[in-house]
Image (tube, grey):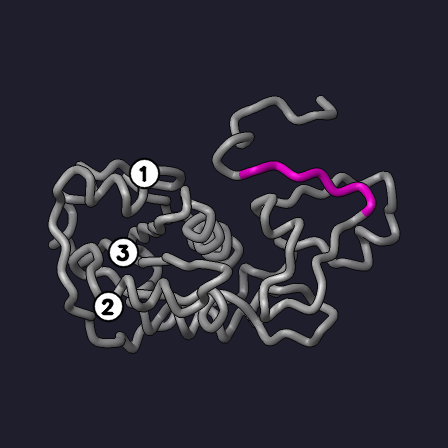
Amino acid sequence: MAFTTLVGTAVLAEKLSDPDWVVIDCRHDLFKPEAGRAEYDRSHIPGARFMQLDRDLSGEKTGRNGRHPLPDPVALASRLGAAGVTRGKQVIAYDAQDGMNAARLWWMLRWLGHDAVAVLDGGWPKWVREGRPCNASAPLPSAFTISAADAVGRTCPVANVARDGGGTSTLTGRPSRVQRSKPPSSTATASWPSQRSIHHSRDANMPLPWS
C-alpha cells in the first residue's frame, strides 16, 4: 500500500531498512538558508538524503518569478534521481517547520506524476522527541532517473491568474513574518490582489474564508 498523504513515525521506523523507501530531509530556515544542511550534517533520520530549498527544490530566479520559483521539471527529476527516487519507490519527506518544506517536495513529486509520497507526521521534532534512531551518515548519490513528462498541465500559468483577475482565488502558505518582511535574498514580497493567506499549521483544516 502506498502512502500518499501522511505517514506516522512508528511506520517509518519499521521501514528504515526497506530499499523501496526513500527518506528526504527538507529542513530549511528562510532567514538562515544554510541552517538546514548544518542540522542534517549534525543528525538526521538514518538513510535520509538532504534536499535544499534554494538549490534543489527551486529554479533559477530572474527577479520576476518569485523567491522560490518552480525548477525545470527535467532538472528536478535528475536531482530526485540522485536522491534515490525512482518509479515504484515510496518517498517520505520531513522537516522541522510543521511540514511546510516537506509539503513542497510532496507537491513537486506529485507534479512529476509520482504519487507515492507522504509527509512524516510530526516531522523531525516528533521523531527526536520519541527517541527514534538518528545518525550523521550521508548516503552516496544514486544514478537513478525519473520521467518529468507528467509535469505538463499540472500548474496554472501566471498569465492566466492575471487575466482572470478577481475570478481566481489564490492562496499563500507563507508565514506571516515572511509576508511582512524581506529576507536578505529577497528583492520583493509580492502578492496577488485576490490572494488569501492560509497558514499551513493553523488553517489547513479550517473552512475557507469564502466557503
The image quadrant of residue 137 is bottom left
Element at badge 2? helix
Element at badge 1? loop
The image quadrant of residue 65 is bottom right
Q: Residue 17: image x %, image y %? A: 11, 54
Q: Which of marks 3 and 2 is in front?
A: 2
Amino acid type, residue under disc 1 in the picture: Gly
**Magenta stretch encompasses residue 168:** no
Bounds of the magenta segment: 193-199
Residue matched to label 1? 122
CA distance for labels 3 and 2: 15 Å
- Residue drawn 71% across the image and 73% down it: 63
Image vertical order of residue 157 relative to residue 41, above or below: above
Q: In this view, does 144 lie to the left or right of 185?
A: left
Amino acid type, residue under disc 3 in the picture: Val
Residue matched to label 3? 23
CA distance for labels 1 and 2: 20 Å
Residue matched to label 2? 41
Q: Residue 22: image x %, image y %? A: 26, 57
- Residue drawn 28% across the image and 62% down it: 39
Split into 4 quadrants, where in the image is the N terminus?
A: top left
Q: In this view, does 118 lie to the left or right of 74?
A: left
